[in-house]
Image (cartoon, helix red, strand yellow):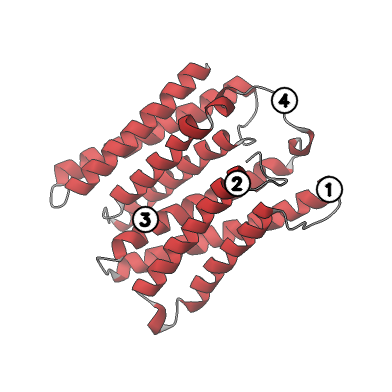
Amino acid sequence: MTAYIYELVCLAIFLYIVAAIFYLLASGSEFKQRIALGLSIGGLLANSLAIIGRTLLVGRLPLANGAEFMLWFTWFTVFTYLFYEVKSQNKGAGAPVNLIAALLLASIPILMSRQLGDVAPLMPALKSPWLTSHVLTAVFAYGSFAVAAGIAAVQLKKNSTSAELWINKIVTVGFVMMTLTIVLGAIWAEQAWGRYWSWDPKETWALITWIIYAIYLHLYYRRDWKGRKANILVIVGFALVLFTFFGVSYLLSGLHSYA
């Protein structure tokens, strides 16, 4: 089963990369755009099957370790992008978002291959009904921020009012989910450790990330903060998301080091 899941992860990475290439080359070609969309959907399907396989392997919803989190993070990123593409009919961000998805998922075989086959029981701190809601709101938030960053990267060269509005909508959804993540995590922490907040490295960096997006949303309606400045802030916010996951998990020790 582990080999099957690993192969699905590698397949999804491959499909996301090829999708990114086709999106990049698809300018003015409806045929190539359809191929790119199909490849992205295929990657999402392989990603979904990997999640299902991991669920069957461990006998629970896979939300406990870094590899499991990354499967969901990538899934929500691509799903959110596909929703955006269908609703907006704007395919300009397909290349960066699929590339982001491929790089995120590639972190599993590079950094977390052992976690993908780990079937050990959950550590006591994770045996909580709060695990599902806390982690799912987090991956929803992170996926939204990834898509917003991909669109913002394209916006640095192509200024579209419609895309700018979509960035704001997606960041708003991500911000709400991030707020829920922090609140649910605080409630869970109080039940598990007797305190709502402990300034754990991941808590601290999650709060910093939340503040950056709060600043973006606050400044969005100021004319002098639209366009390039706003897009850069969205990209900086996503860079902090990545540091909150990778930097804290692999460089800093704390209560969240397992994810």
How far across and how far down the image is residue 208, in percent? 60, 64
Q: Nearer the viewer, mark 1 or mark 2?
A: 2
Earlier sequence position, callout 4 versus callout 1: 4
Locate residue 204: give its quadrant: bottom right
Other-residue count near label 4 (Cα within 10 Å), few / some / many at <14 / 14–19 / ≥20: few
The alpha-carbon separation of the residues under discs 3 and 2 comes to: 26 Å
| Pointer 1 or 2: first along the chain | 1
Location of residue 160 in the rendering, given as x and y in whole percent from the top left corner: 28, 68
Q: Earlier in the sequence, mark 1 or mark 3?
A: 3
The CA span between labels 3 and 4 is 37 Å
Residue 249 occupies which quadrant of the picture?
top right
Please state which amino acid type lies under the numbered disc 2.
Leu
Q: Which of the two discs, 4 and 2, sits closer to the camera?
A: 2
Residue 116: x %, y % from top left: 55, 26
Disc 3 and disc 4 in contact, CB within 8 angstroms: no
Report x, y in % for residue 63: 62, 36
Q: Earlier in the sequence, mark 3 or mark 4?
A: 4
3 vs 2, front mark: 2
Circle 4 residue: 121
Q: Which mark is residue 251?
A: 2
The residue wearing badge 3 is: 150
Query: Does residue 254 sit above or below 233 in this rendering?
Result: above
Look at the numbered disc 1 and give the secondary structure of its residue: helix
Q: Amino acid at mark 3?
A: Gly
Determine the image quadrant of residue 210: bottom right
Pick the front one: 242 or 124 = 242
Spatial CA span between label 1 and label 2: 23 Å
What residue appears at the point 22 percent right and 48 percent down from the top-left corner? 24
In front: 50, or 17? Answer: 17
Q: Residue furthest right?
A: 194
Tell me which amino acid carries mark 4: Pro
Q: Residue at the spot x=30%, y=54% of the render?
A: 93
